[in-house]
Amino acid sequence: MEEHRSSYRRRVLKTGAIEFSGGSLPCLIRNISQTGAAFEVTTPLWFPDTFALVVQSEHLRRLCRIVWRKERRIGVTFIDSQPS
C-alpha cells in the first residue's frame, strides 16, 4: 500500500476526547502525526465536522476537521498551525 500522507503517522493506543459545543465524547486514538490522526469512537453518534481533539496524557489539544469516516473509525486533519 502506498503512503499518500504529507507526514508520517505513528501508531499509538491512547485515550482522547472529542470536544465540541461544551461537551465531549471519549475516543481511542490509533495513529497520529503532525498533520492529522485516526481514532475510534465507541458509538457512531453525530458530532460536528470540526472539533478539538484532546489527549490528556500528552497535554495536547488540536483543532480538527474530519476527512473521512468509516463506521466508528474517523480520520482528521489538524487545522491549527501549532499544538496547544
Image (cartoon, rainbow, N blue to C red):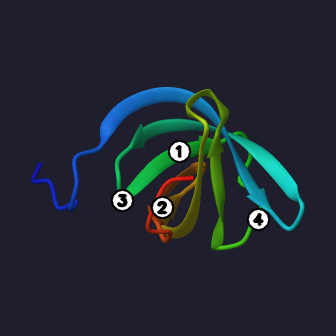
Query: On the image, numbered disc 3 is attached to which residue?
Result: 35
- Give the SS element for disc 2: strand
Q: Position of residue 68 (x, y in %)?
A: 46, 66
**Residue type at numbered disc 2:** Val
Question: Would you say 63 lies left or right of 37 here?
Answer: right
Crowding at mark 3 (Cα within 10 Å: few <14, some 14-19, many 20+) = some
Query: On the image, numbered disc 2 is attached to which residue?
Result: 76
Q: CA distance from mark 4 to mark 1?
A: 15 Å
Q: Nearer the viewer, mark 3 or mark 2?
A: 3
The disc, 2 or 1, on the residue closer to the chain's N-terminal end is 1
The disc, 4 or 3, on the residue closer to the chain's N-terminal end is 3
Q: CA distance from mark 3 to mark 2?
A: 9 Å
The disc, 4 or 1, on the residue closer to the chain's N-terminal end is 1
Q: Nearer the viewer, mark 4 or mark 1?
A: 1
Query: On the image, numbered disc 4 is attached to which residue?
Result: 46
Q: Residue at x 22, y 54 (%)?
A: 7
Q: Residue at x 76, y 56 (%)?
A: 19
**Residue type at numbered disc 1:** Phe
Query: On the image, numbered disc 1 is attached to which residue?
Result: 39
Question: Does the residue at mark 2 contact the one at mark 1 (Cβ under 8 Å)?
Answer: yes
- Please, which residue is most extreme toward the right here? 22
Q: Position of residue 9 (x, y in %)?
A: 29, 44
Q: Nearer the viewer, residue 71 or 2?
A: 2
- Residue 7: numbered disc: none
Q: CA distance from mark 4 to mark 3?
A: 23 Å
- Give the SS element for disc 4: loop
